[in-house]
Image (spheres, grey):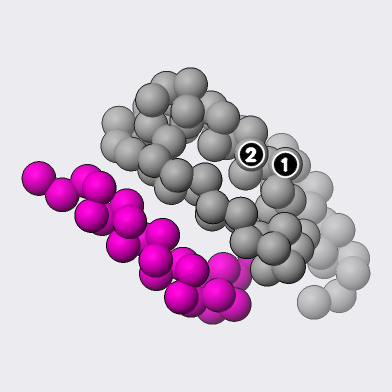
Amino acid sequence: MPADCKGGWGKVLATIDVSAGIDLLAVPTTVLVGTADKLTPEVHSLELAERLRQHGRLHEMVTLPLIGHMINMEEPDAFNAALTRLDTATRD
């Protein structure tokens, strides 16, 4: 992707506020982040996880070293394991 395109998307993404939607979540939620994610830097995921924790909705925060934005493709075993843990924890 050309640098100017990446920069443009970065500006757009910086204006998105998901806090209202996060506050309305009523289900346990897992947050996964790769430390090499340049599209959604780790600091944003940590803030998201903290907000979920404050509302009692954070099931798990998973940080994967040296992984980028496409966690499910870059580290499918870790992604699937986190999904399985969430599924197991939330079964009736």
Tag 1's secondary structure?
Answer: helix
Q: Residue furthest right?
A: 3
Which residue occupies 62% across, 44% down?
45
Name the amino acid type tagged 1. Val
Answer few, some or many: residues within 10 Å of disc 1's Cα (few below 14, many 20 plus, some between 14 and 19): few
Task: Answer whether labels 2 and 1 touch (C-beta < 8 Å).
Answer: yes
Q: Is residue 56 left or right of residue 72?
A: left
Name the amino acid type tagged 2. Leu
Q: Which residue is mark 1?
A: 43
How many marks the image carries: the answer is 2
Residue 68 appearing in the image: no
Q: Is residue 5 left or right of residue 29?
A: right
Residue interval drawn in magenta: 68-92
Which quadrant does the N terminus fall into?
bottom right
Query: Quick check: is 51 in the magenta stretch?
Result: no
> Residue 92, relative to residue 84: is it above or below?
above
Please state which of residues 43 and 63 is positioned toward the viewer in this rendering.
63
> Residue 92, relative to residue 6: is it above or below?
above
Which quadrant does the C terminus fall into?
top left
Residue 43 image-quadrant placement: top right
Q: CA distance from mark 2 to mark 1?
A: 5 Å
Which residue occupies 86% across, 75% down?
2
Query: Quick check: is 89 in the magenta stretch?
Result: yes
Which residue occupies 69% across, 53% down?
40
Tag 2's secondary structure?
Answer: helix
Q: Position of residue 65 (x, y in %)?
A: 69, 63
Residue 61 appearing in the image: yes
Q: Which residue is mark 2?
A: 46
Residue 63 image-quadrant placement: bottom right
Which residue occupies 73% across, 68% down?
66
Q: Is residue 46 left or right of residue 3?
A: left
Q: Position of residue 55 (x, y in %)?
A: 42, 22
